[in-house]
Image: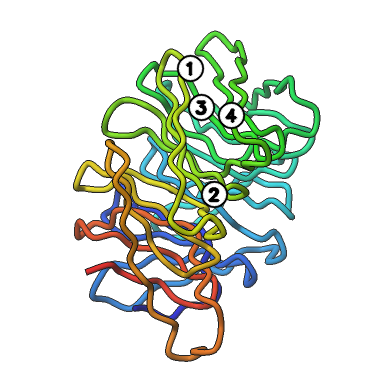
């Protein structure tokens, strides 16, 4: 466990390091496992950096929801910012661009390699697009947290919306699974969801429906791994729906605080790493 401010998002960069956001400090950190982290102070520092992802250009990209910026940071800490409305999720697209969600007023944005910003409206009023991922069909798939749906943006710019079977599911994290479906978490319903390329949705209830799952990734073991914000655990679900859970340690400096795991990633060492907003990065052995 590495103590570090209030981490929120985490991702492995093309430089073989872990990159993470410190949401309340307005900082971005870089960690090579086994070494001390390097922390980059953002200016301004009040933007609340959240989700971070590797870009196709050798840099890392992250969103600042409060600051209204989508930012690019180089391995040596140089930052370039692009204005956006309440950005949150971000991912590299199949076209060499960075794609991100704008929770309000509800759009998906694209920043090309030339720096040009294009935005696509989502036809669900108040839907609040959250996380976003590239699917096996080269489309962008995203969750609609308040729209209770999963959206798909085709390479031609057409948006399709797939309503979820469970009311109040409030989907958040989404990722491409090892089975070429999209897997997502339902923070409101305590379930893991799967949607295939035909739009068929399957839901898997968690043992604790109040666990509030947040982020999800495909692990090195061809299973899906997810964070449980309310219980302080990492969960694992196989493609056949088998679920098991792993408790996370509390940070030594704040043993009385809730663990609050948010983002997670497969580290450069092949282990699962997660960001604990209570003040640490944790590695699952």
The answer to whether residue 180 is above or below residue 63 is above
Q: Residue at 69% across / 51% down in the picture?
A: 65
The residue closer to the viewer here, 72 or 215, is 215
Q: Residue 62 carries which label?
A: 2
The answer to whether residue 16 is above or below residue 53 is below
Q: Nearer the viewer, mark 3 or mark 2?
A: 3
Going from the N terminus, do you reach mark 4 or mark 1 first? 4
Secondary structure under badge 2? Answer: strand
Secondary structure under badge 1? Answer: loop
Which residue is tagged 1? Answer: 199
Q: Distance between the residues labelled 2 and 1?
A: 29 Å
Secondary structure under badge 4? Answer: loop
Which residue is tagged 3? Answer: 141
Q: How far apart are marks 4 and 2 (CA)?
A: 31 Å
Going from the N terminus, do you reach mark 2 or mark 1 first? 2
Q: How far apart are marks 4 and 1 (CA)?
A: 12 Å
Going from the N terminus, do you reach mark 3 or mark 2 first? 2
Q: In this view, does 84 lie to the left or right of 158?
A: right
Circle 1 Cα neighbour tier, 10 Å, few/some/many (<14 / 14–19 / ≥20):
some
Going from the N terminus, do you reach mark 4 or mark 3 first? 3
Which percent across, then down, holds residue 9?
A: 50, 57
């Amino acid at each position: 466990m590495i103590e570090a401010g209030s981490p929120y998002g985490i991702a492995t960069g093309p430089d073989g390091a872990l990159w993470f956001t410190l949401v309340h400090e307005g900082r971005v950190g870089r960690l090579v496992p086994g070494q001390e982290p390097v922390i980059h102070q953002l200016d301004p520092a009040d933007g609340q950096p959240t989700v971070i992802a590797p870009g196709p250009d050798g840099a890392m990209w992250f969103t600042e929801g409060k600051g209204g910026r989508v930012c690019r940071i180089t391995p040596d800490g140089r930052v370039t910012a692009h204005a956006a409305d309440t950005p949150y999720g971000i991912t590299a697209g199949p076209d060499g661009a960075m794609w991100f969600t704008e929770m309000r007023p509800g759009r998906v944005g694209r920043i090309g390699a030339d720096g040009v910003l294009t935005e696509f409206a989502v036809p669900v009023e108040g839907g609040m697009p959250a996380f976003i991922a590239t699917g096996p069909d080269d489309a962008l798939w995203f969750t609609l947290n308040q729209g209770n749906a999963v959206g798909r943006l085709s390479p031609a710019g057409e948006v399709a919306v797939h309503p979820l079977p469970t009311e109040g599911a409030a989907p958040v994290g989404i990722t491409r699974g090892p089975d070429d479906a999209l897997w997502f978490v339902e923070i409101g319903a305590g379930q893991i969801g799967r949607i295939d390329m035909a739009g068929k949705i399957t839901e898997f209830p968690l043992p604790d429906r109040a666990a509030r799952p947040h982020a999800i990734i495909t692990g090195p073991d061809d299973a899906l791994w997810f964070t449980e914000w309310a219980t302080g655990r990492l969960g694992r679900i196989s493609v056949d729906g088998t679920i098991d859970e792993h408790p996370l340690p509390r940070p030594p400096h704040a043993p009385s605080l809730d663990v609050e795991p948010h983002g997670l990633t497969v580290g450069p060492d092949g282990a699962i790493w997660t960001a604990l907003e209570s003040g640490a990065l944790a590695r699952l052995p």
